[in-house]
């Protein structure tokens, strides 16, 4: 058994020393040190060893284990160092070089799409409104017919400020401001940054962009809503897109809809981007709730309207095939220079 152990140790050490990749080292680790590995097999044989030899064998076992572990750690470290060295070699900057001259800037993809949509709506008679990112609870919730016990008001979603104000969770409060300031009939859009207390991952950010829209006139109907939404999507995607309306609940519209577009990546047959469904949720919308009109000082008996809240960040990701939302605000010039 002593012989067997010595040989195993020698072979493992030689293997680690000559391994060319971290994967090879890992394979040796599993084979020798793993729970079902060779050392474990030997230690299971200990029962058969005469008691007077057990101490020695046990010691040898431990020594073998320690020395192999140390060799593996050393080799892994060396691989890390090599990797770092390769990276430093590839990504270095020579600070003594003369500056590269003026590098022309370019618009952020979000800005670019936002401006395209603004131009489109201005050509349709809409006014572009701006609203503050720090909003009152009244404008963000109450005036939009969001009852006090609605989950959207939850502390986890909303960033509250110490003075009782909040960071707007959507661009819908600009509807409230629009109703207060614009003469009727009104057509407005409001692009802007919104904030939610979200766990950040590839598809969620605490800060993202929406584009709100609202039209109030006499006898505005779902037909108007669909016409404008299709015009919007055709303008953005430069082709006719297939849309689907599903009922959706938002306290500030009645009826409310989720407007999905057929996935532009796979054409509707199913892919990872649309989670195999063939459809992508993009544009919640609906007819403005009478309570919202009333709270905005507009008589719902005389006027009606539609509203929508386009997920601008998501749209930009669809349009450019960006699969990680964190890249948009990451500030990495290598990403930004592609646009
Ligand atoms: N404000 C909603 C949100 O952020 C989106 C929305 C839905 C806006 C329906 C609308 C609308 O104007 O009609 O989740």
Image: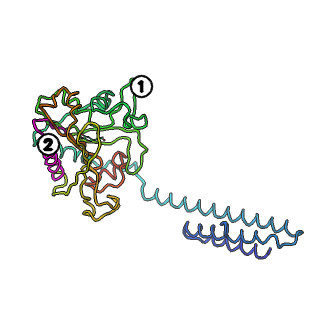
The residue that disc 1 covers is 162
Magenta stretch contains residue 162: no
Q: Circle 2 sits on which residue?
A: 221
Q: Quick check: 125 left or right of 267?
A: left
Disc 2 versus disc 1: nearer the observer: 2
Q: Is residue 16 visible?
A: no
Q: Secondary structure at mark 1?
A: loop
Q: Give the camera-side residue of 262 and 142.
A: 142
Q: Residue furthest front?
A: 301
Binning the other alpha carbons within 10 Å of mark 2 as few (below 14), some (14 to 19) or many (20 upward) gives: some
Quarter of the image that includes the N terminus: bottom right
Can residue 275 be seen here?
yes
Element marked by disc 2: loop
Q: Residue at x 42, y 56 (%)?
A: 91
User: Going 40% across and 30% down the picture, which residue do you hit?
Assistant: 160
Is 54 positioned to the left or the right of 118 in the image? right
Depth check: 335 or 294 in front?
Answer: 294
- Is residue 220 rendered magenta in the image? yes
* Distance between mark 2 and mark 1 Cα atoms: 41 Å
Q: Residues within 10 Å of mark 1 (few under 14, many from 20)?
A: few
Q: Is ligand 1 less than 8 Å from the beta carbon at label 1? A: no
Q: Which residues are magenta?
A: 213-234
Q: Give the quarter the ligand 1 occupies.
A: top left
């Amino acid at each position: 058994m002593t012989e067997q152990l010595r040989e195993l140790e020698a072979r493992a050490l030689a293997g680690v020393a000559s391994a060319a990749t971290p994967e090879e080292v890992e394979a040796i680790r599993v084979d020798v040190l793993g729970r079902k590995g060779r050392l474990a097999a030997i230690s299971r044989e200990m029962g058969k060893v005469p008691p007077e030899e057990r101490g020695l064998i046990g010691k040898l076992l431990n020594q073998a284990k320690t020395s192999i572990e140390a060799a593996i750690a050393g080799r892994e470290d060396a691989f890390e160092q090599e990797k770092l060295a390769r990276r430093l070699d590839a990504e270095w900057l020579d600070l003594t070089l003369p500056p590269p001259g003026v590098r022309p800037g370019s618009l952020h993809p979000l800005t670019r799409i936002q401006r395209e949509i603004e131009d489109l709506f201005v050509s349709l008679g809409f006014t572009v409104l701006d609203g503050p990112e720090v909003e009152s609870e009244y404008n963000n919730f109450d005036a939009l017919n969001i009852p006090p016990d609605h989950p959207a008001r939850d502390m986890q979603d909303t960033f509250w400020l110490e003075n009782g104000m909040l960071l707007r969770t959507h661009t819908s409060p600009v509807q409230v401001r629009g109703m207060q300031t614009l003469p009727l009939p009104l057509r407005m859009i409001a692009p802007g940054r919104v904030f939610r207390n979200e766990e950040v991952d590839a598809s969620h950010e605490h800060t993202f962009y929406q584009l709100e829209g609202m039209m109030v006139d006499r006898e505005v109907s779902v037909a108007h809503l669909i016409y404008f939404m299709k015009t919007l999507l055709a303008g953005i995607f430069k082709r006719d897109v297939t849309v689907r309306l599903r009922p959706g609940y938002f306290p500030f519209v009645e009826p409310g809809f989720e407007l999905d577009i057929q996935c532009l990546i796979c054409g509707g047959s199913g892919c990872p981007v649309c989670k195999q469904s063939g459809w992508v949720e993009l544009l919640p919308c609906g007819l403005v709730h009478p309570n919202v009109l009333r709270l905005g000082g507009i008589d719902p008996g005389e006027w009606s309207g539609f509203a929508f809240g386009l997920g601008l960040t998501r749209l930009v990701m669809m349009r450019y095939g960006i699969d990680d939302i964190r890249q948009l605000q990451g500030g990495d010039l290598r990403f930004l220079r592609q646009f």
